Image (spheres, coloured by chain):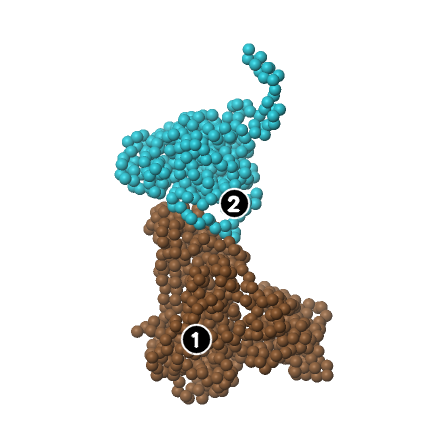
Amino acid sequence: MTYITKPQLHHPALAKNALGYTRRDYEGRVSTLCAGCGHDSISAAIIQAVYELELPPHRIAKLSGIGCSSKTPDYFLGHSHGFNTVHGRMPSVLTGANLANRDLIYLGVSGDGDSASIGLGQFAHAMRRGVNMLYIVENNGVYGLTKGQFSATSDKGSKSKRGVVNHDAGIDLVSMALTLGATFVARSFSGDKDQLTPLIRAGLMHQGAAFIDCLSPCVQFNNHAGSTKSFDYVREHNEAVNRLDVITPRAPIHVDYAPGETVQVAQHDGSVLSLHKLAELYDPSDRAAALGFLQAKQALGEIVTGLLYIDPSAGDLHEALNTVETPLNALAEPELVPGAAALEAINASLR
Amino acid sequence: MQRTSSWGPEYFHKVVDCQWACPAHTPVPEYIRLIAEGRYSDAYMINWTSNVFPGILGRTCDRPCEPACRRGRVEDEPVAICRLKRVAADNKSDITGRLPKPAGKSNGKRIALVGCGPASLTVARDLAPLGYQLVIYDGDAKTGGMIRSQIPRFRLPEEVIDEEVGYITGLGGIELRMGARIDSLKALLAEDYDAIFVGSGAPRGRDLEIPGREEAAANIHIGIDWLSSVSFGHIDKIGKRVIVLGGGNTAMDCCRTSRRLGGEDVKVIVRSGFEEMKASPWEKEDAIHEDIPIINYRVPKAFTHAEGKLTGVLFEVVRAEYDEKGRRKLIPSGEPDEHYECDDVLVAVGQENAFPWIERDIGVEFDEAYDMPRVDEATMQSTIPHVLFGGDAAFGPKNIIWAVAHGHDAAISIHKLLNGEDVKVRPAPDFSLVSQKMGIHEWSYDNDISNDRRYRVPLREKAVALKNVKLEVELGFDRDLGLKEAERCLNCDVETVFADKLCIECDACVDICPMDCITFTEDGEEAELRTRLKAPAVNLTQDLYVSGALPTGRVMVKDEDVCLHCGLCAERCPTGAWDMQKFLLDMTHAGAACLSN
């Protein structure tokens, strides 16, 4: 870890967004993770994405579980709400927070241990309920904090740093999220911020359960030959299906692709996702086809990245529950406690 | 782009902006770190080796290092390098034991040095320990040249001059012939010296030939002559109302001296605009602080006088206009002329070289346009190989630190010449590049960046300071302030060194860099590459540090411009591809190391 605080001085030409904040204003404390950790790159991508979206820091809530990845919310968005919850329980706490205050933007940060082992059930139910959040799994395929055991997402046949071969099948969280009904599913790589940052922007704006599985090499314990989550392996086997640009009503950007190569997807909030196709036949609006494509490529040892599935007309948990527009935490006592007469009426309706 | 070579001192020297800008290439960050450690004598000796006059320069240097200082590009103001030098000088202990020992015996070579100013004294300092017999001639009774005659005592106390000139004259083998003005180079050549160094300065103050000059002559003084008379005690008062004409540092010394000799209403009136004045910004500030207005865009037309006595100066009011090439022209503004009353005028409109004592038929060629000797910029030789020039005498008025740099170069030339070597072959500087890594995240330098703004040097109370022309006005940083100011130094000599082969392109350095200096991108031509970095590299005077091709085919590009040298790139690097390495460059001075054999 680094002992000094990151100097306050910044580049004299550092730009400000419409809120008057520089990118540096969205930083957190200096990282205590190992030097070179992929998670730090994801933190940098989150900072960049939120800066670009021009979001006020106090309108964001970042929640995490336990693990290296779950430490990272300390290292970005230092002026946002944060909750470092119990191991594997981030989705429950986030769901509760979301129900109480639907006006915040929710970012859940977790790891492969936190989400694919102890928290697998929590992960599954947050996806199927359609909690309006961006759920990022910083997936390094290894238990770094306990010195390098295989995690549940380690691929079968991959080798640990000590040379042990993994005999268990790896859990593919992307396939699970697709099966469970997530309405925004992507995979990316910490070493490719050009791909990752727009995905984070799109995921934060998605009205529903958005999931990004982000491969993030563990430099200390899982970046060797024989690993399938190392920088070299991911770079060699990365099969990006598309490149994403997010066009917000506030910040229109010019996209310069030849016609026919780009698919425009309009989202609820008025933003447009402009998808530049890399794999010719890939259609990110077809859940079943996406699953098939993933399975086929996985069999070939390729790692499919990009925006894999999106349902632009997705609804979220609040829509399903038919809650009021006003956040529950903003309702006053008269609305929350309608009184004995109202209770009597409800009871009567059930008799 | 061409991969940046990490070998050879040129690239890394340029990163150390202050040292690169210093004519004598003083290792500035090295001595500032020593000051921060309280090792004042060590800091002093580093200066003494490079620039010979740390105590003097710590009060008077033109500080080419400070406008170059990287700190000035990342916040408002550079490190107060010059005044930190004074901290070393003020707080050192007795360093006489660390000076070079006198040569055991003479090497039989005799050198004549004309003028006893900073250039000649530097030559003497470099050559005396080698056994040369040095004879210094000067028309003045005291040593130091312009350091003593033209710099007012309230900026530079006499003890400091005596001390630092004394370190040199005490080296042995130096004979001072004070009061012995050289009137003929031809005669000096006839004395069979093995080499002659001319460090006679630019001793002639320019006059202002406008109407009334002769009639009012009694109260019109040439600035540098007047300063010299004040320094030597020949003049100790001036009229109540004084006008100083000119906008250079001499004008600033004249007006501030006038304030101390009875001038109550002292004005500086200058042809140019305030911003274009030649005086250093801090010298202008000091004058304004002493209640001296600086009035600009006034061209003197005539000295007015009555009954043979000066009454004032008449000025034409002008304004500046720039042509398409950016050249300035002063054109009449059309406003009526202005008259300023005064009792005395000090003319400080520039100074010139004067070589009436060099015969033009003895082989020293002169440039006809400027009436200056033809001097080789590298060797300092004139067209007579064993007659060399340095300081203001070589290329016109500059400053002390340039005189020192010339002196070093001339000493090398003399030593090589008298050892039968090719003078044109200049010695390379010595350098080292050493990792500062002490532990995983520990460095042997303080990499925590201070957020402090530049500290002001405490001044003596104005009412007291203005009463005595010999009382030093600046009190200097004390040890505490000196430490705080030293902490502002960014340690630019602790260089970011990149090893291509170790890089795994994890982006950790890119993410942590507070200044957005680092980019991994496709290679390209420099001009185009500069536009697509994480922060565009618009400062073309600052180099790009470029790696070879990395495994993904990209290259690492670092813009040196605003790097804080905080070492976070190296701390966050998992493979040690980045390392912080201290670059120490020592100029080779006259001695065994400057010889090829």
In the rendered image, which quarter contains the N terminus of chain B? bottom left
Q: CA distance from mark 2 to mark 1?
A: 54 Å
Residue B501 image position (x, y, % from top left): 33, 51
Q: Is residue B588 left or right of residue B391?
A: left
Q: Nearer the viewer, residue B234 or B571?
A: B234
Looking at the picture, how far across and down is residue A135, in whole percent? 45, 33
The picture's colour for chain B is: brown
| Helix, strand or loop status at disc 2 | helix
Q: Is residue A51 left or right of residue B340?
A: left
Residue in front for this viewpoint, A243 or B442: B442
Q: How many marks?
A: 2
Q: Amino acid at mark 1?
A: Tyr
* Numbered label attached to residue B471: none
Q: Farthest residue in the front direction?
A: B93
Question: Which mark is in front, 2 or 1?
Answer: 1
Q: Tag on residue B167?
A: 1
Q: Is residue B379 visible?
A: no
Q: Quadrant of residue B96?
A: bottom left
In depth, the one of B363 and B11 nearer the eye is B11
Vertical comparison of B508 with A116: above or below = below
Tell me what hue chain A is rendered in: cyan
Which residue occupies 40% across, 33% down?
A: A114
